[in-house]
Image (spheres, coloured by chain):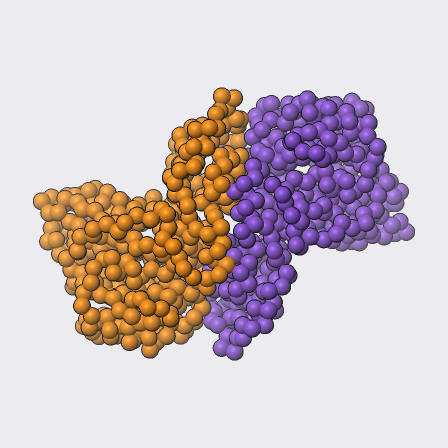
Chain colours: A orange, B purple
């Protein structure tokens, strides 16, 4: 089917090259299409890595292996296959991943467990070994390319390539972060989401990199939803080549650690929001802020209950200031809440406070706000200090059309 | 908007009158429509009652009061307001319910807590006291009517009236059960659902009636979903007038207790399925059977994860045998599962067994099955003895159209 570019799309930014990375793409031909669908990112010796992965009980072999590899903290290459997730393919699927790891390890003269593999696309179809081998050979011989080429090559139902960057000063050394991501449907991360990759030339201890990635993930990728469906292949990896030649970031006491974390958090947030902006069928970008919750985690869960509610999402699509449906979604979240302390608003205007509609509430400015492309929903639970912001999109006929017709 | 009758609708059955009930409807005019929207069912002295209610943290005053009243076990009347749920209306909302209870109690010369009130419709708008009073006066003076009139009068976005009946022999006495229900969207019961009422002329101890209703609810109303959104007003009540003059059903040892429970279960199951058949935008009725789970409750949760997945529901709408999305939904359920023991099928035909696609799998008969109006999905987790069946419908453009445009 012909996927038109999301109205919420953002132009691809100018991502800085990251010293210690070499980007290449090739045509493995995983599907019958005329595009690059295999990505190979070669990483300098000494690169450290951290990762967060889907909690799905049906995770792919790529995820299973990646989890173990990330614990070792070393990486020499990333391979991404697009068009076939290789999930739910049994022993054969695992062997396919191991073949890719062995082939690249041999070419780069390193250990197979330093090669990270991700696959995305249809579930339940074995990754064709011959196509993977052919595509890898082509990639190993290809000219290097740019970030936008890689961002295109890892996509599937994505309607635009997605990237984000930042930099930070570590003492006297400026380090750079460039990140890319793919994702549009089956988006409801549970600790991790989609396929996202952040590369930096900073030198970072892998344990500390993991700690920072987990923390950033909790406030970014874990706060987005398109459809409440969690993928079997969700993966976010962060690679640090160390080529900026600055001091090692070993813990929060290291010079520049806060600046680096802030840059990483910014890249992760931008990448996460870009996925929502490419949500299948999305016409509106929705930020839901929940305050006054029992805890930050409770606020996040209430936010996701609202962001996953088809009745809330269709009301947004219809430009209907239907705050009663927000009340419903708070009520069903299973989190601490008190109906008589609950306040709900749109676009910064309260419609109801402490359990009842405001007598002076005027729907006119709210309806105008809902007619725009950027919508905010505010919920105050009035029982504690916990807060979180969750990002989602509206639910439109476009989502139905894409998913009733497309075998993803 | 003009709601056309669901293609999955069933004709209203011939429900037997229940001795000890008097049915009346009237026009309170809760919305600007030309139809009866207030229902009054008068119940004979000595009627016992049991109830299950929404677990929403934002439940309406009707639900709060109903929960307390059901514990007392006595009922003399049921009042149902359609077009306004009176939920999230603070103290004023509670006073409206208490006014209705007082007015009917005075007319019937009984205690206010023997009058059960339900309201359904838009959230956050105070039930107009004058319209309720006017409607009740009209109902108290109206001629009695039949079940189909009541089934119409309690509906909102329902496209057809819904009822079910059964009978059972208790010793030498035949007792009858007649049930009605309303519901179409915001359907994802959590112990209770929608507005459903079962009336019987059996004489039943209220504690035992509660035990039977809770048990039946767990296998029927708690196993359906249309959109994963749980209402603030969900209520199921069962009234027993005792007018059949048989023996008291006091516990499972009472003669005919099993027959009565079986009849009650059948009525509840039929009513629950009728709600799914009127699911907003539904074109297909889907039964999801999960076996081999850790427990029956775990099987139910896995089934609901599948039944609530928009990707599964849009695949069904598109007639796409996309079993990979079923795998995804099992994986995200958060229940015990083992990818390598999981089997998935449609229409009784396995597509994948024990973690991988079957080599001999032929999609042709499955695609034919999915083209029909009644679809089954089979999942075997392969790890235990737990099982459950969950009922849902597909997700179509019709759902979007109804909910983007309708203030419910």
Total numbered labels: 0
Asked whether, in this view, residue B21 is left or right of residue B54, the answer is right
Q: Position of residue A88 (x, y in %)?
A: 44, 67
Asked whether, in this view, residue B389 is left or right of residue B263, the answer is left
Asked whether, in this view, residue B19 is left or right of residue A367, the answer is right
Residue B240 position (above or below residue B364): above
- Residue extending farthest to the left is A172
Residue B70 position (above or below residue B294): above
At horizontal 75% and vertical 45% (from top left) the residue drawn is B179
- Say if residue A301 shows up in the picture: no
Q: Which quadrant, please, contains the C terminus of chain A?
A: bottom left
Q: Position of residue A181 (x, y in %)?
A: 31, 55
Q: Position of residue A61 (x, y in %)?
A: 38, 66
Q: Quadrant of residue B49?
A: top right
Q: Quadrant of residue B345?
A: bottom right
- Residue extending farthest to the right is B172
Q: Which quadrant, please, contains the N terminus of chain A?
A: bottom left
Residue in front for this viewpoint, B367 or B64: B367
Q: Position of residue A202 (x, y in %)?
A: 16, 52
At horizontal 69% and vertical 25% (from top left) the residue drawn is B131
At horizontal 58% and vertical 65% (from top left) the residue drawn is B370
At horizontal 61% and vertical 62% (from top left) the residue drawn is B375
- Say if residue A361 shows up in the picture: yes
Asked whether, in this view, residue A333 is left or right of residue B157, the answer is left
């Amino acid at each position: 089917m012909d996927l038109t570019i999301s109205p919420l799309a953002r132009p691809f930014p100018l991502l800085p090259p990251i010293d210690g990375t070499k980007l290449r793409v090739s045509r493995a031909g995983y599907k019958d299409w005329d595009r690059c669908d295999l990505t190979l990112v070669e990483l300098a010796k000494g690169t450290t890595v951290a990762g967060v992965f889907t909690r799905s009980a049906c995770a792919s072999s790529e995820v299973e292996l990646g989890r173990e590899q990330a614990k070792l903290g070393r990486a020499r290459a990333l391979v991404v296959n697009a068009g076939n997730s290789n999930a739910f393919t049994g022993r054969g699927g695992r062997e396919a991943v191991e073949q890719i790891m062995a082939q690249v390890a041999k070419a780069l003269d390193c250990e197979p467990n330093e090669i990270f593999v991700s696959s995305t696309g249809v579930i339940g179809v074995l990754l064709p070994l011959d196509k993977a081998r052919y595509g890898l050979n082509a990639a190993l011989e290809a000219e290097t390319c740019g970030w936008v080429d890689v961002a295109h090559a890892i996509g599937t139902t994505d309607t635009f390539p997605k990237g984000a960057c930042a930099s930070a000063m570590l003492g006297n050394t400026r380090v750079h972060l460039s990140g890319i991501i793919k994702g549009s449907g089956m988006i409801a991360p549970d600790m991790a989401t989609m396929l996202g990759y952040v590369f930096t030339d900073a030198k970072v201890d892998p344990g500390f990199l993991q700690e920072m990635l987990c923390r950033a993930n909790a406030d970014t990728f874990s706060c987005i939803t398109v459809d409440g469906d969690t993928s079997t292949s969700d993966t976010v990896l962060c690679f640090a080549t160390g080529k900026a030649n600055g001091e090692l970031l070993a813990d929060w006491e290291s010079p520049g650690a806060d600046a680096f974390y802030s840059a990483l958090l910014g890249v992760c947030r931008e990448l996460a929001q870009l996925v929502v902006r490419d949500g299948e069928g999305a016409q509106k970008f929705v930020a839901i802020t929940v305050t006054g919750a029992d805890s930050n985690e409770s606020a996040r869960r209430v936010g996701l209950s609202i962001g996953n509610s088809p009745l809330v999402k269709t009301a947004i699509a219809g430009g209907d200031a239907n705050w009663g449906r927000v009340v419903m979604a708070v009520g069903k979240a299973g989190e601490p809440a008190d109906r008589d302390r609950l306040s709900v608003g749109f676009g910064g205007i309260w419609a109801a406070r402490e359990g009842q509609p405001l007598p002076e509430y005027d729907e006119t400015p709210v309806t105008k706000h809902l007619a725009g492309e950027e919508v905010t929903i505010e919920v105050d639970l009035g029982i504690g200090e916990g807060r979180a912001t969750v990002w989602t999109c509206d639910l439109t006929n476009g989502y139905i059309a894409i998913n009733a017709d497309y075998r993803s």
